[in-house]
Image (cartoon, rainbow, N blue to C red):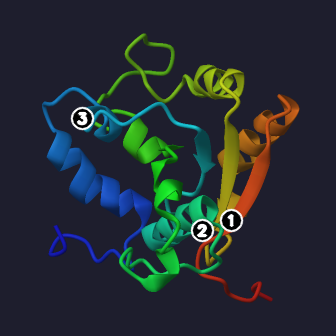
Amino acid sequence: ASRLVDIQTATTREVVDKLVKPYLENKHTSFSGFFHAPRPQVHVIHSWDSKFNDLVVSILSHATGIPEPSLDLSHVMFRGHEKDFSKCYFVDAFCVDQNVVAAVGDQYCQTDKFDLALDLLRRAGGEVLFVIDRDYLALTRMWCLFEARWALRDGMSLEVAFGTMRPFPR
């Protein structure tokens, strides 16, 4: 897999196109469904054109409370944080069957059910994490802003996490 994608530079879209879709081709399920992931507790808002590394670092920081965590999970900074790794996150790239091609409104379409998925999470006491990447792309995406607005409208807790920290572009 590392030959197909450089995790340090690849976008989430590249990870999905080069790893997730081929791996799950003809399996008729999402990545999380294939691995029987537990019900998510946190909905993640992110830009697919952002660095995948920023997405992972942001989630790891949110889960552990460690700012700018190492991606080496054996690192000493993670001692005592083992329980933090049991939290489950809804990342659309992994929770939706990326190989389904169905029109919006079709019962098999998995990308038009955002409001239903977020409502289920809200009813279960879930929260929302808004991932801000190194290029601030999520703040320029209307869908990301819509998801944040929807969560706030429904009274959900919304936290912001940053991937690689970088001064704001001028």
Seen from this angle, which residue lies furthest front?
Answer: 80
Q: Is residue 23 above or below residue 134?
A: above
- Label of residue 161 in the image: 1
Q: Position of residue 126 (x, y in %)?
A: 67, 35
Q: Is residue 149 left or right of residue 162?
A: right
Distance, label 3 to label 2, CA atoms, is 25 Å
Residue 55 x, y percent position in the rendering: 52, 64
What residue is drawn where x is 43% and y is 12%?
106
Image quarter (top left, top right, bottom left or bottom right) of the C terminus: bottom right
- Residue identified by numbered label 2: 61
Which residue does the image show at 19% across and 73% down from the upper left? Answer: 2
Determine whether the residue tagged by mark 2 lies in a helix, strand or loop.
helix
Position of residue 12 in the picture relative to residue 34 (left or right):
right
Do the residues bearing badges 2 and 1 touch, measured as CB atoms within 8 Å? yes
Image spot of residue 22 (x, y percent): 16, 48
How far from the left and from the top, in percent, is residue 45? 62, 50
Q: Earlier in the sequence, mark 2 or mark 1?
A: 2
Q: Quadrant of the N terminus?
A: bottom left
- The vertical placement of 70 against 110, above or below, is below
| Residue in the image at 24% along x and 46% along y | 21
Q: Which residue is mark 3?
A: 34
